[in-house]
Image (tube, helix red, strand yellow):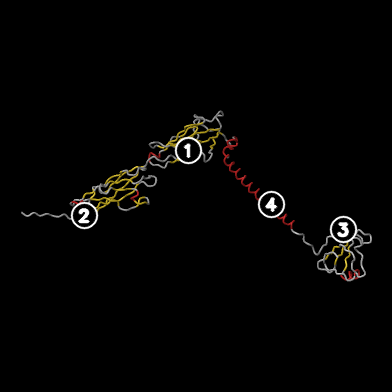
Amino acid sequence: MIQIVIADVNDNPPAFDERSYSTYVSENVKSGHTLCSVSAQDPDWRQNGTVIYSLLPGKVNGAPVSSYLSVNGDTGVIQSVRSFDYEHFKNFKVYVMARDNGSPPLSSNVTVSVFITDVNDNTPQILYPAPEGNSFMTELVPKAAQGGSLVSKVIAVDGDSGQNAWLSYHIIKSTDPGLFKIDLHSGEIRTQRDISDSDNMKQNILVAVKDNGQPSLSATCSMFLLISDNLAEVPELKDMAYEDSSSKLTSYLIIALVSVSTFFLTFIIIIVGLRFCRRRKPRLLFDGAVAIPSSYLPPNYADVDATGTLRSAYNYDAYLTTGSRTSDFKFVTSYNDNTLPADQTLRKNPTDFEEVFGDLDVSPEVGRL
């Protein structure tokens, strides 16, 4: 009897139980949440039939697939690495490879589709009227409005999907509860009855917008209604509406006033400084030399010796005319009666001075002889 032992050869790749896999996961799940598991079989013997699982490289919403999912290499269990956001992407695909441990190793791939389900994590966003604190919204209601008249409408949206985005509108508080009503699904505000003279001119309605998620999320807004044909009939309401604008305008006016005052003060300081500097400068002589007479004039200052020179000290003013050889010689009043008359001026040419005083220097100088 001959016993023949046949050795195994790695000639069979792993085969997945399913041609493809699909799984659903809620957004905002925590890290480590199990999505699904994949399974593959290999008919080879021992290590040739050992299967190892791994994720093929890829991108999910611009990020590596390994940053969102992980797979257990021995069991094929796929888990989340981080939470998902339904508002950013709703589904994606990954590829899982099953490889045996033979030599050479054989492998096969399978597609796993991941669908993200929405969670009610977004509150309704009110578009009209603007959220309270951003602006002051007022609607005019004619005094002759009858029951069922359309007054205004609340507009809101929700970032979720499905029933989580179904919105309903409710009046939770109003100045006159029996005067206005709101449509549950459209958000239209209408009068329930005719307007009467006894109704308050200013009406305030607080509206709540709720979604249909579990748990339900909501947002509120205030609607200001004015029963009047003209806004000017209620001046205090107009003042309230523009209170913030007036405050800002006052701030701007204060800043402008301070800037102008600073500029004006700087200009005045510069002008005063310039005038002070000019006063400290020596006065200039105009078109010639000017001699300032002393306070004391000695007697006989005009007496002349035989040599043709003045015997006594005297004071005089010499004036020169620009562009001319003519000189002005002005004598000042003396204490002696024998002197020349006061404020007597001689206008002579150089030759005239020689005839009177002899050889006298008449250069344009100011001095004391």
Q: Which is in the foreground here, disc 4 or disc 3?
A: 3
- Give yes or no for contact between labels 1 and 3 (Cβ–Cβ under 8 Å): no
* Residue 369 placement (x, y as % from top left): 86, 65
Quarter where residue 31 is shown: top left
Q: Secondary structure at mark 3?
A: loop
For this view, does 145 lie left or right of residue 37?
right
Q: Which residue is denoted by mark 2 in the rendering?
A: 102
In-image side of 270 versus 49 (left or right)? right
Q: In x, y percent, where is residue 58?
A: 33, 53
Q: Which residue is mark 4?
A: 269
Residue 144 location, quadrant: top right
Which residue is the site of mark 3?
296
Badge 4 amino acid: Ile
Question: What separation in Å lies between label 4 and label 3 (alpha carbons)?
Answer: 43 Å
Q: Which badge, 2 or 3, is on the more N-terminal residue?
A: 2
If you read the primary sequence from the N terminus, does the residue marked by circle 4 or circle 1 appear first? 1
The nearer-to-camera label among 1 and 2 is: 2
Residues at marks 4 and 3 touching, judged by CB atoms closer than 8 Å = no
Residue farthest to the right?
A: 338
* Amino acid type, mark 3: Tyr
